[in-house]
């Protein structure tokens, strides 16, 4: 079985400061990891993914994520937060290639204060 | 441009009624999924399909059904709507080696 944990319901950060949104996972094989963002009254938008290769993955809007196999983590990061980054962020995992569905975490609300 | 659309965007129905939510994608993806989003639970998988005539149950499938008669559509049916099914529903599709693309969501209220 595969599962994802996002330990923080909400993260508050001041504009211009670095941000981190935490994610840990549990899978039986090699993980395929994803981050999605949801703005109010919208569907989920893809930010970035880790399949294999470099542990630091760069994605849309200046976001990046670091895959850490020993800690089973895939934290989302951004060097300098913007007020427009305020949204709901979801981490997701699947444990093999092919067609299995993603398992999502419960989401973390990011609030960036001006 | 290819897209995935859901309809209706908002629906209010009465307990016990049958309701069908539509999902249509023009990506030509084989894989389609229905999730529900509830506060504190994130997105939970209801049903999914790997291709025409294929359907599978997800973790919260009780009270829901889907059918896949073509590649583009995966309608979700609530056989007898219950208040516990008040939620926001998202449809998604994915190619074999792509990320998932999500619709805008359907907000369903069962009164």
Image (cartoon, rainbow, N blue to C red):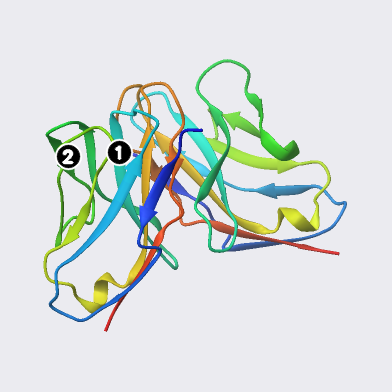
Q: Can you give x and y, in whole percent of width and height, for residue A88 in the image? A: 58, 57
Report whether A58 appears left or right of A5: right
Residue B13 is left or right of residue B103, and the answer is left
Hey, which residue is sitting farthest bottom in the picture? B111
Q: With respect to residue B17, does B95 lie above or below?
A: above
- Residue linked to disc 2: B68
Out of B29 and A51, give the one closest to the viewer: B29
Residue A1 in sight here: no
Give how far across and how far down residue B110 sits, in percent. 27, 78
Q: CA distance from mark 2 to mark 1?
A: 9 Å
Which chain is indicated by disc 1?
A: B
Tell me what residue is drawn at x 22 percent, y 37 percent.
Answer: B49
| Disc nearest the viewer among 2 and 1 | 2
Quickly name the residue at label 1: B32
Q: Secondary structure at mark 1?
A: strand
How far from the left and from the top, in percent, is residue A11? 67, 60
Reply above or below: B6 against A32: below
- Residues marked 2 and 1 touching at CB (< 8 Å): yes
């Amino acid at each position: 079985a595969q599962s994802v944990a996002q330990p923080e319901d909400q993260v508050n950060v001041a504009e211009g400061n670095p941000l981190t949104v935490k994610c840990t996972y549990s899978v039986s094989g090699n993980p395929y990891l994803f981050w999605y963002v949801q703005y109010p009254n919208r569907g989920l938008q893809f930010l970035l993914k880790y399949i294999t290769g470099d542990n630091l993955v760069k994605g849309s809007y200046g976001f990046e994520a670091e895959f850490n196999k020993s800690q089973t983590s895939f934290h989302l990061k951004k060097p300098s937060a913007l007020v427009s980054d305020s949204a709901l962020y979801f981490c997701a995992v699947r444990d093999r290639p092919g067609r299995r569905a993603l398992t999502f975490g419960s989401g973390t609300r990011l609030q960036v204060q001006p | 441009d290819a897209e995935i659309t859901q309809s209706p965007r908002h629906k209010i129905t009465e307990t016990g009624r049958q309701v069908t939510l539509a999902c249509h994608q023009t990506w030509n993806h084989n894989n389609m999924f229905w999730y529900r989003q509830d506060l504190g639970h994130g997105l939970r998988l209801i049903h999914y399909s790997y291709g025409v005539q294929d359907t599978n149950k997800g973790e919260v499938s009780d009270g829901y059904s889907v059918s896949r008669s073509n590649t583009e559509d995966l309608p979700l049916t609530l056989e007898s709507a219950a208040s516990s099914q008040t939620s926001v529903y998202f449809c998604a599709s994915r190619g074999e080696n792509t990320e998932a693309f999500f619709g805008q969501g359907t907000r369903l209220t069962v009164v």
